[in-house]
């Protein structure tokens, strides 16, 4: 955040202006972007390069290294690009000065990044809907006398059936795991797998 304040000061703004502008950045965003910026700053200092005015090829070399050598996910590396772009000086392209994320070469690199290193997605659920539905028709999830099932099993069954019928996308059902169902005294909370 200090780097952001410094950039505002160098641009000639009075102290109150950056305070107001930086208030728009949530703490959660700072916790993500600040360490990424600091890592880039350290890398630049080791090479005696100013991080806020590093040449674009140097920035792309750094980002490429993150995905190739450090094996970070492409979307994570795009987050590094965003973090750097927020603090990097604008760069002239044609008659305009642009943020580095708007430069043609950076946009092409960014597109190619996701093509060359596509995100890994789990497409097929790790469980069978037929088996689960079959199990819900048998004890301990089913009995003609509902009192014999117990509140916990009945709630699990109901939560699953409600989730199955109300999922926004069919693929969300693949994100349901038993470990993500929390039971309270009078409620059951069903959450999707956070890695989904």
Image: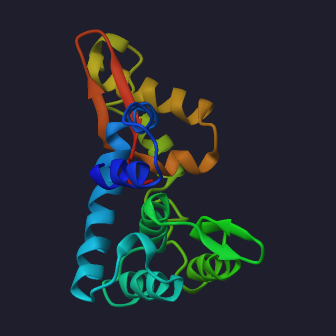
> Can you give x and y, in whole percent of width and height, for residue 26 in the image?
38, 37
Q: Percent from the top left, x then y, of residue 57?
A: 51, 88
**Could you say which quadrant of the image residue 92 lies in?**
bottom right
Compared with 14, 174 (above or below) is below
Q: Residue at x 64, y 44 (%)?
A: 169
x and y percentages locating residue 115 in the rendered image: 62, 82
Toward the viewer: 121 or 89? 89
Which of these two is toward me, 82 or 117?
82
- Relative placement, left or right, of 45 versus 117 is left
Residue drawn at point x = 71 percent, y = 77 percent: 93
Q: What is the quadrant of residue 91 in the picture?
A: bottom right
| In front of the other: 92 or 118 | 92
Q: Position of residue 175 (x, y in %)?
A: 45, 49
Q: Is residue 108 above or below residue 177?
A: below
User: Can residue 137 be seen in the rendering of this structure?
Assistant: no
Tell me which residue sits at (53%, 50%) in the image: 130
Q: Compared with residue 182, is residue 178 higher up or lower down, i.e. above or below?
A: below
Query: From the viewer's perspective, is residue 23 above or below residue 171?
Result: above
User: What colour scheme governs how the chains and residues are painted in the rendered image of this protein?
Assistant: rainbow
């Amino acid at each position: 955040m200090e780097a952001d304040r410094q950039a505002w000061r160098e641009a000639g703004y009075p102290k109150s202006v950056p305070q107001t502008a930086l208030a728009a950045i949530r703490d959660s965003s700072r916790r993500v972007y600040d360490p990424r910026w600091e890592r880039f700053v350290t890398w630049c200092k080791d090479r005696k390069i100013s991080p806020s005015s590093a040449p674009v090829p140097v920035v792309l070399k750094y980002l490429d290294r993150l995905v190739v050598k450090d094996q970070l996910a492409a979307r994570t590396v795009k987050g590094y690009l965003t973090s750097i772009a927020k603090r990097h000086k604008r760069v002239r392209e044609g008659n305009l000065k642009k943020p580095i994320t708007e430069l043609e070469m950076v946009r092409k690199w960014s597109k190619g990044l996701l093509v060359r290193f596509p995100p890994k997605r789990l497409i097929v659920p790790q469980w069978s809907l037929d088996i689960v539905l079959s199990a819900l028709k048998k004890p301990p999830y089913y009995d003609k006398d509902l009192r014999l099932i117990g509140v916990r099993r009945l709630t699990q069954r109901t939560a699953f059936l409600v989730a199955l019928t109300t999922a926004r996308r069919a693929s969300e059902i693949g994100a349901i795991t038993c470990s993500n169902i929390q039971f309270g005294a009078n409620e059951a909370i069903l959450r999707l797998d956070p890695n989904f």
